[in-house]
Image: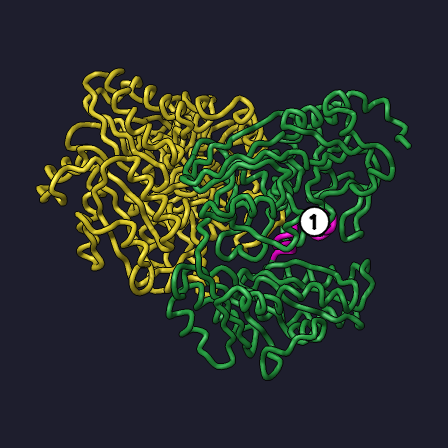
Chain colours: A green, B yellow
Amino acid sequence: VASPQLADLAALTEVVGADHVLVDDDVRAGYEVDWTGRFRGRCRAVVRPGSTAEVAAVVRWCGAHGLAVVPQGGNTGLVGGSVPGPDGDGVVVSLHRLQRFDPVDEVAAQVTVGAGVTLAALHERVRGSGWAFGVDLAARDSATIGGMIATNAGGIRVLRHGAMRAQVLGVEAVLGDGSVVSHLGGLVKDNTGYDLAGLLTGSEGTLGVVTAARLRLVPDPPDRVVVLAPLPSVAAAMALCARLRARVPGLEALEAVLGDGLALVCDHLGLAHPFPADPPVALLAEWAGEGDPPDALVEIFGSDDVLVAADGAGRERLWRYREAMTESISAVGVPHKLDVTLPLGSVAEFADAVVGAVQAAVPPAAVHLFGHLGDGNLHVNVTGVDPDDERVDDVVLRLVADHGGSISAEHGIGRAKVPWLGLVRSDSEIAAFAAIKAALDPNGVMNPGVLLPGEG
Amino acid sequence: VASPQLADLAALTEVVGADHVLVDDDVRAGYEVDWTGRFRGRCRAVVRPGSTAEVAAVVRWCGAHGLAVVPQGGNTGLVGGSVPGPDGDGVVVSLHRLQRFDPVDEVAAQVTVGAGVTLAALHERVRGSGWAFGVDLAARDSATIGGMIATNAGGIRVLRHGAMRAQVLGVEAVLGDGSVVSHLGGLVKDNTGYDLAGLLTGSEGTLGVVTAARLRLVPDPPDRVVVLAPLPSVAAAMALCARLRARVPGLEALEAVLGDGLALVCDHLGLAHPFPADPPVALLAEWAGEGDPPDALVEIFGSDDVLVAADGAGRERLWRYREAMTESISAVGVPHKLDVTLPLGSVAEFADAVVGAVQAAVPPAAVHLFGHLGDGNLHVNVTGVDPDDERVDDVVLRLVADHGGSISAEHGIGRAKVPWLGLVRSDSEIAAFAAIKAALDPNGVMNPGVLLPGEG
């Protein structure tokens, strides 16, 4: 069944081919809902351009017809930024066909890839070059490089290599006015104008569509050691993290499971508890390098109760306690997932306060805390309350703002957090964002309703 | 002697105090010329605001009166970006009085400082905290943090820690419309809007005035080793650099002196030549860490003819061969200084080609090459020709562009390189830059004539 305005779309079929303009309700449906199921909208069509030039033609056509452009990669986002709004007046631009994959530049330790390449494919293709890609995250099989740039994705190695913005040396992109910019030379030092690549990274599809990127690669050390340690408090864990960061080069991850999370994982998976008693914090550290880890790693952790693994199977076993948190929580109930950062000096105080604050506001709630402790990035999961009860989001995000934190560490604002953006960004900042958006997206077609207040 | 429009400036004296509005010709003169002496302009007054609010008032006043705002820090730039243009219709805003210096946050490894703090003062104040600031450069005693952010300054440690943009976690700034934005929370993961700090970094004062910044600090390892090695060609040096980058974590610098540079330094300083014969390339590597350097450092360099120093005096002695290049060249004559980056795979070809190209275009020229080889960043110094003979700049910058390089690695575009910006940036990119500038500087008062073509 075609949408009533099908005739208008004829021009699009001339650009991308009839096979790549999808208008049937059941075909569109998969592109109109995010994977959490919480965000569901409608679009006139899904368009699948096969080149940067085709993306540009689509954006210009949408601009001329006043239709929203909703860029979509792997559609693995958690804040509704990759699906259309409810009014149905837009076009989803799926970027899966942008599969450019240049040979790895082993001298420069760089590679150029299309926006539609998945993270898993990138890791796979880079393997064996002596280099690795510095960002990794659980959605790797679906998440695309374009989407990860649009959201400045983070993950488990930000501590060592930074988030996506730190990997992006340049982009090719279609801006909101339909113009194409391309700067894929991969020069590490290049002071010739404003940092367009950095600006587009994390802009959540509201300024333009990234179609390809030049990415830096990082060393891929042969040896790795994982340590899992019980700690008496978040404050103690933060102090230990600070000492590790100061004295252990090669630290790749500092992750933590708080409170009863470890017991939850052990119960869910039927694992033996790793420690004699439940610690308030289980801290996981991974070091990578060549040879033995620095003495400081051993000195700082001490040896009582600490589990250490240097072989692949052992490392995987220790990581399991952290990585299984998500599924173990989901087994309890459908959670509110709030992804926040605190200043490192305030993580302990926030972690102590948030449980009581949520339970006071929404009494039946259970609060589960885990995340990228070394970055101050906690995933606050709340079960036992209706997934749509925004009182949970409100109390957590306000507490975050009161502690000088960020209401979005690595997921973005999307559609989900627009109402709370003003908690952490001033009127002047939001006005500056709006001015930048108007400059690069003068027709206002790029992902309206996402990141900034607006229609869509 | 006051400028004719002195009466107009009364409002400014009310903002910053009469002591901080400088109008006398001889007092202004020092602010109107850059330290190379090549760029000299005129301004109505030099204003020295003492707070962000005062900067905002000055910018708004200039906007209302159509006067250019020329932000100035240490005035150590090499491309004329911190001095007024020739028309005299602007105000230099000196930021030296912005001396905020918050205590070092040792948990987060961060510090907040005012724009007027010098790099040397920052290093000094951070010393003893267990952390260090990751950028260093020769102009440290004069260069200010604000100016270094405005120019995205680089220096000798970019290889390890990145340039200024990688150190800036957030800024306080006055945008071109006089609004104040401030985001100094220091959150490493913070996806709540566009990357204003990254955009302002490297914008050369054309979008706004950075008044303070939250900076990341880096570990300050106790042990350092410097290696100086003779290599038979730039290609061999680049291959060795690639192996070092892949296998030696903790590499802080990869610097080189090419051709007869080493002999020039030895002659100038009366030093013994470090090697039995003049090598085509002298490569200097510095490693920092705790304990002994990785075995890979020794393996990759081998031992024939290689000089190694682990103590402070020995390291300084080896660095001297690289650091004295600038003064040794200046002893030969007033050089053209061109700061360029090449793709790592093209450095060798460019280095071979540039000497002949310059000598063919301007026959009496002598070409001296040195720089941050690990970043692909060469300083092309040309002596033996008139310092104002733009044929030199033209032939070098065109050759850089032909090799896919950048016409500015770490100095910026300033006033000096505006005519060549189109060699490396497309019309679409320059249009996007102009749109961003118009968005944040709607009155067009911020440093006109710098970075982008325009009046001033």
Taking depth in this image into account, of A115 and A422 the one nearest to the observer is A115
The residue that appears at 40% across and 33% down in the rendered structure is: B343
Q: Residue at x 80, y 72 (%)?
A: A364
Q: In the picture shown, does residue B102 fall above or below B26? A: below
Residue found 18% across the figure and 18% down from its top? B364
x then y, percent, for residue A307: 52, 75
Label 1: how many residues lie within 10 Å, few (<14), some (14-19) or many (20+)?
Answer: many
Q: Is residue A110 above or below residue B436?
A: below
> Which residue is disc 1 drawn over?
A77
Residue A263 in view of the camera = yes
Vertically, is B253 above or below B127? Answer: above
Q: Label 1 lies in what chain? A: A
B418 sits left or right of A412 in the view: left
Q: Quadrant of the C terminus of chain A?
A: top right
As for residue A413 lying within the magenta part, the answer is: yes
Question: Can you say which quadrant of the picture contains the N terminus of chain A?
Answer: top right
Q: Secondary structure at mark 1?
A: loop
| Magenta part of the chain | A406-421
| Picture coordinates of residue B367, whole percent (x, y) | 23, 26
